[in-house]
Amino acid sequence: MNKSIILNSRPDGLPTKENFLLKTGKIPKIVEGEILLKALYVSVDPYIRGRMNDVKSYVPPFEVGKPMQSVVVAEVVESKNKSYSVGTHLTGMLEWKKYQVSSGVGLFPISADLAPLSSYLGVLGVTGLTAYFGLLEIGKPKEGETLVVSGAAGAVGITVSEIGKIKGCRVVGIAGSDEKTKQLKDKFKLDEAINYKKTENMAKAIKEACPKGVDIYFDNVGGVVSDGVILNANNFCRIPVCGAISQYNDKSFTLGPRINPIIISRRVRLQGFIVFDYASKYLEAQMKLAEWIKAGKVSIEETIIEGFENIPEAFLGLFDGKNIGKMIVKI
Amino acid sequence: MNKSIILNSRPDGLPTKENFLLKTGKIPKIVEGEILLKALYVSVDPYIRGRMNDVKSYVPPFEVGKPMQSVVVAEVVESKNKSYSVGTHLTGMLEWKKYQVSSGVGLFPISADLAPLSSYLGVLGVTGLTAYFGLLEIGKPKEGETLVVSGAAGAVGITVSEIGKIKGCRVVGIAGSDEKTKQLKDKFKLDEAINYKKTENMAKAIKEACPKGVDIYFDNVGGVVSDGVILNANNFCRIPVCGAISQYNDKSFTLGPRINPIIISRRVRLQGFIVFDYASKYLEAQMKLAEWIKAGKVSIEETIIEGFENIPEAFLGLFDGKNIGKMIVKI
């Protein structure tokens, strides 16, 4: 029997289980040129929240009544396409379906021999590449500089922090629980970690953790956490603006301080980016990341939830900060 | 008799005449190695407002009871320094004094044969160089792109707009009176000009004036005008953040919309800058600007107020939008 998860209604603020609907049906049949895919791992990511709104962005919105999508690792279980043999593993943007038909277009073959299949959704996939390009192409870390990372215990944040250490930075992470800050320091060797939920004055906490000021701020969250960091920006501070999870459920723009006087006087550069813009350099980055993983300098850190039915719950868990590292659903 | 203008008190919000005090005294005597300078033209600029606060920035604050400073064009009227002969014209950061003593250090010789002396305070000085580097180094205009300039009738704004036209952009200016918008279109050949004081919905006005969206936004003002422009940002929009005159008199950060979701999805780059960071390229830029002035492509546009006593009034006039082009006081 096939299963799929469709967008049942658009969320009004924070998404709920009621926005999703589990549907069952028959396993589809394939025709000449097609392959049948069985989902093995499904990625859930904060950016998915944006596509649930009826707003044009860099990707079109999901349609109500149609299946949700994200990056999936799947196995070819039936093939009428000579390019793909049964047992091949592929990854790419796919629907939240246990079984689905594809022509293979837009999917990439991956190998379990090189790295665990799930890691293609994390450190060798979108989140690892996002960390790699955001930090190296926009942040441009130099030895001895101070790097602050918000959402530091998330999938992107951990990899950013680890690459920051490789590049010789003092790395300060911000996360939302004592368990997370402990792991950031003990397991991932960050120099300091701040639990923002227990911090009343973020500007002061950053000042203490960064006695030489902030040279790079990798921003995954936006909002008041970022305000506190930016007040400590050094001259020529670079801010790769990667995510704004604190704002994704807002119905309109919330208000924050107008920081232009700081941007000017300290020559701050804020730059938004999307990993897809660096697609031509993916392979090069994946090889570098694989090398760092092998050397034990970059971790494969995953929170794995089991069961197709639990995809919505895993996604909703992102907004409660339930994951350390990449949140993945194993089917 | 000598005259000087000192900082009498720090402004609380918008500066007033009472923050300044005119003092009289004797014309100073010089000793070996010194020169006596007579001020000819004094520059008043929005950034001076920042130095009136007791806040460390890229330049130290003015001291209460001490003379104000800005860039001045002066003539050597007496010399006991072999490097400077009487009649030489010099420019640089000097005090608001009719006569003052200098060693010449930090001052640059200028020639009235090359360009009018006052233009070294404007288009060949800080404002022209600010326009040049902000637009070309950060904005990076390409033929056919749309450039929006706020504070477009100010000294920086006019030069930015004219360089934008030279580079083949569609240029849309924002200014604060119908007289200014008329001049921007008729005299400076901008494609469109918007009077923000008569515009209720800036986002809509920009959308109408920029049917292809905004590729570069040269921001001199900050605040709600900028909010409306940024909502129309195209993908990969560049925003040189040059000034925030709408915010300079605020006592703390005012609130504005948190635009991170736009920065991310449209890959916007906001970058603050200060012209002094480009000092090594000044000469190259001045030669290019002089060439454009000669070709009639860049204007020397000045609002000249006469009389040493009127320096504070000229400065205060900047916040009322009284100037078109560079505001200069002729002594």
Image: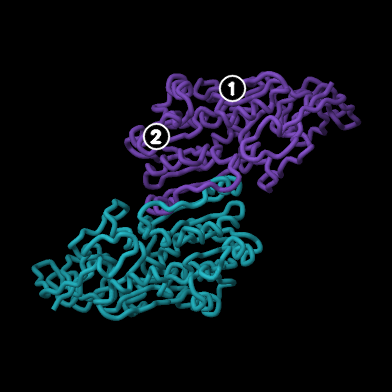
Chain colours: A purple, B cyan
> Which one is in front, A4 or A291?
A4
* Residue at the spot 12% in from the left edge and 66% down from the top edge: B33
Mark 1 and mark 2: Cα distance apart in space: 30 Å
* Residue at the spot 57% in from the left edge and 45% down from the top edge: B261
Q: Secondary structure at mark 1?
A: strand
Looking at the rendered image, the disc whose residue lies closer to the viewer, 1 or 2, is 2
In the picture, the disc for residue B33 is none
Please state if A108 lies on the left or on the right of B266 as rendered.
right
Q: Chain of mark 2?
A: A
Image coordinates of residue B110 in percent, x first then y, are: 30, 73
Q: Quadrant of the N terminus of chain B?
A: bottom left
| Mark positioned earlier in the residue sequence (1 or 2) | 2
Up-down: is B76 above or below A114?
below
Image coordinates of residue B114 in percent, x first then y, are: 36, 77
Is residue A145 among the parts visible in the rendering? no
Q: Quadrant of residue B143?
A: bottom right
Q: Quadrant of residue A22?
A: top right
Q: Secondary structure at mark 2?
A: loop
Up-down: is B144 above or below A54?
below
Disc 1 target residue: A302
- Mark 2: amino acid: Glu
Image coordinates of residue B218 in percent, x first then y, are: 50, 61
Please state if A257 lies on the left or on the right of B170 as rendered.
left
